[in-house]
Image: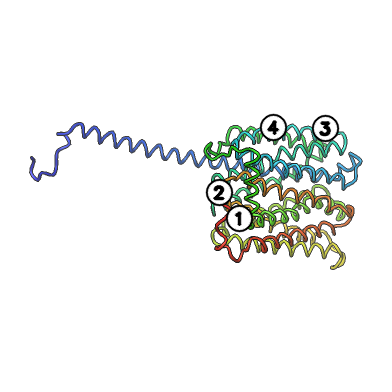
Amino acid sequence: MPEGGAHIPEAAHPAATETATKAGSAAATGTAAEAAARAAHRRTGWLVTLVLGGLTATPPLAMDMYLPSLPAVTRSLHAPAATVQLTLTACLAGMALGQLVVGPMSDKWGRRRPLLIGLAVYVVATALCALAPNVETLVAFRLAQGLAGAAGIVIARAVVRDLYDGVAMARFFSTLMLISGVAPIVAPLIGGQILRVTDWRGVFVVLTVVGVLLGALVFTRLPETLEPGDRHGGGVTEALRSMRALLADLPFTGYMLAGGFAFAALFAYISASPFVIQEIYGASPQTFSLLFGLNSVGLVAVGQLNGKVLVGRVALEKVLAAGLTVVILAAAALLLMATGAFGEVGLAPVAAALFVLMSAMGVTMPNTQSLALLRTRHSAGSASALLGTSSFLVGAVASPLVGIAGEHTAVPMAVVQLAGAVVAMACFVGMCHPWNTRADAKGAGN
């Protein structure tokens, strides 16, 4: 034995040396592979984020690009404003009902297959809208467009729930709001410019092309996020059981209703503002598009404030309460202006109140979704379907109400906005118990 008995020269053990060398090489290779995998994951993550942003942009693309052309549709199809507004209602109702079907389907078959089928039908329905000969046919095609477009909305939320949890999920929803928020900024501007060179049918041609591009991106870039072992095979019965369990959870239902009635205030603005701004205040379609885009900028900016600054530092319940309070105050100001409480007011004060109301949606919408989805770890598709359906159904009801007194008064719009915001606050306070979140943190467990 060599002196000291502790050290054996490596040359005396060539096999050990070879083993050590291979181990070192394997470790180095493993480290390089892990680094490459992390880089690929980051790239995939950004691609998935962009795809999900595009999917959540489907509703504003389908509705907002069409908004500047609403007065032109009334003239082209010789239909009253209230009937033309039904084209928005039909699309919204279709998106609501479609989510009830597509959400459970995605829990059973995975996210990709229902999404791709939905996008294909959406493209066909949108193309048919451009060919509609009368307002009744247009309403029917818009209903089909909404039913198919629901796939993108509900599955995007379910994918987020598959990938994220807790604060990370709330932040991701705010990131999606930044991406999808570009759509309502750009869509009315594009719609206004399209009307310069063609009629309202050209808007649907552009929407068809956008749908084709989005479908290609989903097909090539969005991986399956729901593993086979996490899927539910019970069909309609299992879906209904999951939804019943979710609705039995009082805070989940409270967040769902709060988000739905807040969306009513938002959709009252979407449905009525083209007539309020263009017909009552005499603005051009291009001016309306610019104001609509400015309001969307406010929504996106506050959404980013929510995700980058508030989430993780301030309780989501507190932020949601503040957002709903601002919506109530802005809607009350609009109602006072519409009823003449401040005398004759011009476009600027009304536009300012609408800007405040829309900006506050940047914290109300993502936080109601996050707080609701945090209460379920399974059946994310069914939970997402309930959230989306409630919002779109309430919005579909709000749409014809804003035109009930004709197109020359803003009072119905302001009444619907204020009522929706007040009911949303009542549901949040009365059912979610925001002052007792720790005791109520168990969740639905679905």
Instruction: Indicate which disc residue 377 carries.
Output: 2
Tell whether label 1 touches label 4 (CB within 8 Å): no
Q: Earlier in the sequence, mark 4 or mark 3?
A: 4
Give, as a three-letter code, the residue at label 1: Leu
**Extreme-bottom residue of the structure:** 342
- Mark 1 or 2, closer to the camera: 2
- Mark 3 or 1, closer to the camera: 1
Whether residue 54 appears in this view of the structure is: no
Q: Find the distance from the CA under tag 2 to the CA under tag 3.
A: 44 Å
- Mark 2 or 3, closer to the camera: 2
Q: Earlier in the sequence, mark 1 or mark 2?
A: 1
Q: Which quarter of the picture shows residue 262?
A: bottom right
Q: Earlier in the sequence, mark 2 or mark 3?
A: 3
Instruction: Indicate which disc residue 317 carries.
Output: none
Q: Which residue is mark 3?
A: 131
Q: Which residue is mark 4?
A: 120
Give, as a three-letter code, the residue at label 2: Arg
- Mark 4 or 3, closer to the camera: 4
Give the quarter of the figure containing the N terminus. Answer: top left
Q: Find the distance from the CA under tag 3 to the CA under tag 1.
A: 42 Å
Q: Element under label 3?
A: loop
Give, as a three-letter code, the residue at label 3: Leu
Q: Find the distance from the CA under tag 4 to the CA under tag 3.
A: 18 Å
Q: Find the distance from the CA under tag 1 to the CA under tag 2.
A: 12 Å
Q: Which residue is mark 1?
A: 371
Q: Element under label 2?
A: loop
Q: Which quarter of the picture shows residue 53?
A: top right
Q: Element under label 4?
A: helix
Residue depicted at 77% across the width and 58% down the height: 417
